[in-house]
Amino acid sequence: MNARQLLAIAAMPLAAQAEPATAPETVRVGVFLVAPYVIAGSSGPQDALVKFFDQEIAPRMGVRFEWEQPMTVARLERSLISGRLMFTPILAKTATRERAQIRFAGESQVHFTPAIAVLPTHPLNAIRTPADLSGITIGWVQASALPPFMQEPHIRFDLVGAIDWERTNLDKLKLGRIGGAYFSDRQTARYFAARTGIQLKLLDLPVAGVPLYAAFSPAAPQELVERYLRAAGEAFAGGRFAAYVNQEVEKH
């Protein structure tokens, strides 16, 4: 091997180091608050869902998620439709959202168990039919989906537009301004009850759990959706997501 060849070999590591690493594609993501899956942190959303998608989904997609500050469901919808945001990890599928061309990706990987939270002194101990809720004002949040069971015309709602709608509705419940608060997942009610000190009676609805889907903006490239589907198939396998949720719940 001559001197010229030796110099060429010696220079190879330096040339490789000189080439900048390609930064992963950035995807702007929006979420609404729903503890213990997403809570507000000092620098943005955090907790089980955010950790799972950052650590399990993003690397498999070859992207970096840029998380917007938590927002209302109504604003999240508008941001997806306009293309300001490309993606949200969980959103209920509705005909209205599909007509707006929000793209729901694949199968539901997350299911919520809905419940009505009432005070312990409330006379209602079980919900069997929508008529059981007749005459009770139920707190909920604007623009969020409801199961058909809760869409009977005689059920009255008090809808709030606050980002921290869970605390708002529990405060109203405690003050007697509403008779019950609807939660899309009973774990959310339990989470906030433990942190606010309010005693609750949770009444499960006689319905199947609410399926939630990853959803993309109409402006999202099809290739990005396909990368998500491949990544989600691997990441959600083996109960990984449940392990993230359990870890966060046990910390509090």
Image (tube, rainbow, N blue to C red):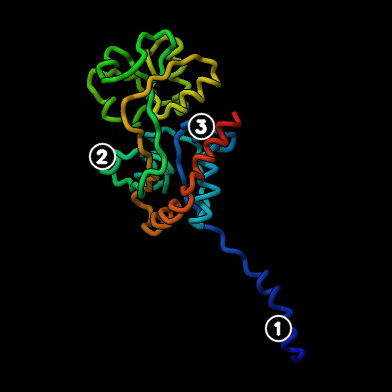
Q: In the image, which disc is placed on residue 95? A: 2
Of the numbered discs 2 and 3, the one sitting upstream in the chain is 3
- Measured from the top left, where is residue 169 in percent x and y? 43, 19
Nearer the N terminus, badge 2 or badge 1?
A: 1
Relative to the observer, which residue lies in front, 91 or 82?
A: 91
Q: Residue drawn 38% across and 16% down?
A: 180
Nearest to viewer (mark 2 / mark 3): 3
Task: Report the side of 17 relative to 171 (left or right).
Answer: right
Q: State the mark number for residue 210.
A: none
- CA distance for labels 2 and 3: 27 Å
Query: Identity of the amino acid at label 3?
Result: Pro
How dense is the environment of label 2, judged by Cα within 10 Å: few (below 14), some, or many (20 and up)? few
Residue drawn at x 41%, y 9% as measured from the top left: 176
- Is label 3 in a helix, a strand or a loop? loop
User: Residue 43 falls in which quadrant of the image?
Assistant: top right
User: Mark 2 is on which residue type?
Assistant: Ala
State the separation of the CA atoms marked 2 and 1. Answer: 63 Å
Q: Which residue is mark 1?
A: 8
In the displayed structure, 14 sits above or below 160; it is below
Q: How many marks?
A: 3
Image quadrant for the N terminus?
bottom right
In the rendered view, tell whether residue 9 sits above or below residue 40. Answer: below
Spatial separation of the CA atoms under disc 3 and disc 1:
57 Å
Q: Which mark is residue 36?
A: 3
Residue depth check, mark 2 versus mark 1: number of the one nearer the observer: 2
The amino acid at mark 1 is: Ala
Quick one: label 3 or label 1, which is nearer the N terminus? 1
Asked which secondary structure carries label 1, the reply is helix
